[in-house]
Amino acid sequence: MAIGVETVIAALVAVLYGLQSESHGGEGGLGWLFGTIFALVLLAVVAVIAGLAGSAVAVLPLVLLGRAVARRTGRRDSWQLTLATVAVVAVALALLIGSCTLLADFDGPGDLLVYPALALGLIVGPAPATLCARAAGNPGKPGARWRVLGGVALGGLGLFAVTLAVGVAAYGSGILKVYEPPRLTEADMVGTWTDDDGGSLRFEADGTVTAKDVSRYEATGERSGASDCTGKWQLTGNDGVGQPYELGIADCEGLSLGWDIGGTEEHPTVFTWIGERDSGERYVLTRQR
């Protein structure tokens, strides 16, 4: 159960943190909020079931290994020894996994950070569940299993509530801000926007736009060619769909539909979806001036 609690808390943190990131999938509103809560509840159920399997495969072996080490070394079985066992196993796995990863793709000394990052993750993840399993299986304390189970459940609910409250307070106070697309004027659009692969859109103040090697995509997401043309552009209001503005391009074959504004005020972008909107794939051009 502890693994399930960890998973749900981590998912909640990811959702709260992700609200800052650029997103154009219709986030926001009560529908999205209820959908997210439902997804977290469903994740909790799945995580508990998966956690039972994880306990059998990883957590219980760590508890038994800690007790075996205590017997072999003549030490008293303690939570400190169990935690040390988790740390040693985590470091060994980090060295093994990290070495395999770096052998496959090593780009420089900075990649060596994979070792401490893996070790820390492998310690932080299993450690709470392992300590709970050790406490629950303590033969000297009858009923320990149910006390630990109740403590994990109540503690998990409390931690979930605190995490949610802190996240809401951070966004409500302005410490963190939910992502909003930049609000550009027509003057802000004037200039050259490129895709870093040879394609560009040049917006002029008189309302004309020149496309050079701008990629076109089919509804299936397949690239169907490139556009080289001159047309008209217009920035219009687009209230009610999560985008303050919509960019329209006319008289340019293959480029007349589906353009939006993204990025930030400092680094705005124009983009169109590749294939279906739900795919999350976008063709992005960044302002160069």
Image: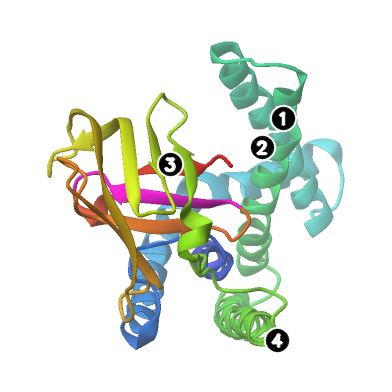
Q: Residues within 10 Å of mark 1 (few under 14, many from 20)?
A: some
Secondary structure of the residue carrying numbered label 4: helix
User: Which residue in the protein does label 1 denote?
Assistant: 115
Q: Is residue 139 above or below residue 69?
A: below
Residue 143 picture quarter: bottom right
- Tag 4: amino acid: Ser
Q: CA distance from mark 2 to mark 4?
A: 34 Å
Q: Which residue is mark 3?
A: 285
Spatial CA distance of label 1 from label 4 is 37 Å
Judging depth in this view, the residue of 169 and 270 nearest the camera is: 270
Q: CA distance from mark 1 to mark 2?
A: 5 Å
Numbered disc total: 4
On the image, the x and y values in percent for residue 249 come to 25, 52
Residue 94 image point, x, y percent: 66, 31
Q: CA distance from mark 3 to mark 1?
A: 36 Å
- Of labels 2 and 4, earlier in sequence is 2
- Judged left or right of residue 191, residue 108 is right
Q: In this view, which residue lies farthest toward the front?
A: 206
